[in-house]
Image: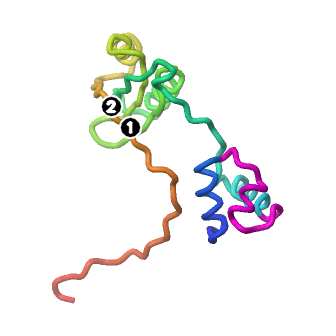
Amino acid sequence: MPNFDEVNRSLLLELQKNARRSNRELARTLGVADSTCLERVRGLQENEVILGYTAEVNLDAMGRGLKAMIAVRIHPKSRDAVESFREFALSLPEVLDVFVVSGSNDFQVLVAVQDPQHLEDFVLDRIAQYPSVADLHASLVYEHLRRRPVEILEPTERRRPPTPWS
């Protein structure tokens, strides 16, 4: 596990704000040498803290402004059925995120489509037709908020709650 000292913490926060910044600019912002900054970034990549770099897109500008969360229940409950549906869902261009969850549903699938008709067609013709789908429920997403950047949490001690007799 990498050392999450102040430099690494700051580096992760800065990269999440703008990963396109040059190493020189990052080093200047952090107050470290260019070589130190580069070494730290490589270390975070090697330790798989930084998994990659992506471009965030505007779904409205792409004509995909209608978002929905689709709760899916699988039957039979087997590893093969879960893995198969997961791969199927990830292969669909409408799908943004797939969450494998506990509870009454097995998946929460976030999709972005053009309009209500496309959502209905997608749900009925693609998701509902998959062989292991036992039940599903679609909910419109009014707003999708993300907390950025992701910060490093300090480890917490597990404390036992006080007992009445202590």
- Span highlighted in magenta in the image: 19-36
Q: How many neighbours does mark 2 have within 10 angstroms: few (below 14), some (14-19), or many (20 or more)?
A: some
- Residue at point 29% right, 25% down? 138
Choose between 66 and 68: the one closer to the eye: 66
Q: How many neighbours does mark 1 have within 10 angstroms: few (below 14), some (14-19), or many (20 or more)?
A: few
- What's under tag 2, amino acid-wise? Val
- Residue at point 49% right, 70% down? 154
Q: Residue 98: within the magenta?
A: no
| Residue 97 drawn above or below residue 50 | above
Image coordinates of residue 49 in percent, x first then y, are: 63, 54
| Residue 58 drawn above or below residue 3 | above
**Of helix, strand and loop, which mostly describes the magenta segment?**
helix
Image coordinates of residue 97 in percent, x first then y, are: 47, 33
Circles 1 and 2, Cβ within 8 Å, touching? The answer is: yes
Q: Label 2, secondary structure: give it.
A: strand
Identify the residue at the far left of this view.
Answer: 164
Viewport quadrant of the N terminus? bottom right
How many numbered discs? 2
Does residue 15 appear anywhere in the picture?
Answer: yes
- Residue at point 27% right, 26% down? 137
**Label 1 belongs to which residue?**
144
Q: Label 1, secondary structure: give it.
A: loop
Instruction: Kindly indicate the quadrant of the structure image that contains residue 34.
Output: bottom right
Choose between 2 and 60: the one closer to the eye: 60
Choose between 75 and 85: the one closer to the eye: 85
**Label 2 belongs to which residue?**
141
Image coordinates of residue 65 in percent, x first then y, are: 41, 23
Instruction: Kindly indicate the quadrant of the structure image that contains residue 44.
Output: bottom right
Q: Residue 21: within the magenta?
A: yes
- What's under tag 1, amino acid-wise? His
Viewport quadrant of the C terminus? bottom left
- Using the numbered discs, state the Cα–Cα distance from disc 1 to disc 2 in whole angstroms: 7 Å
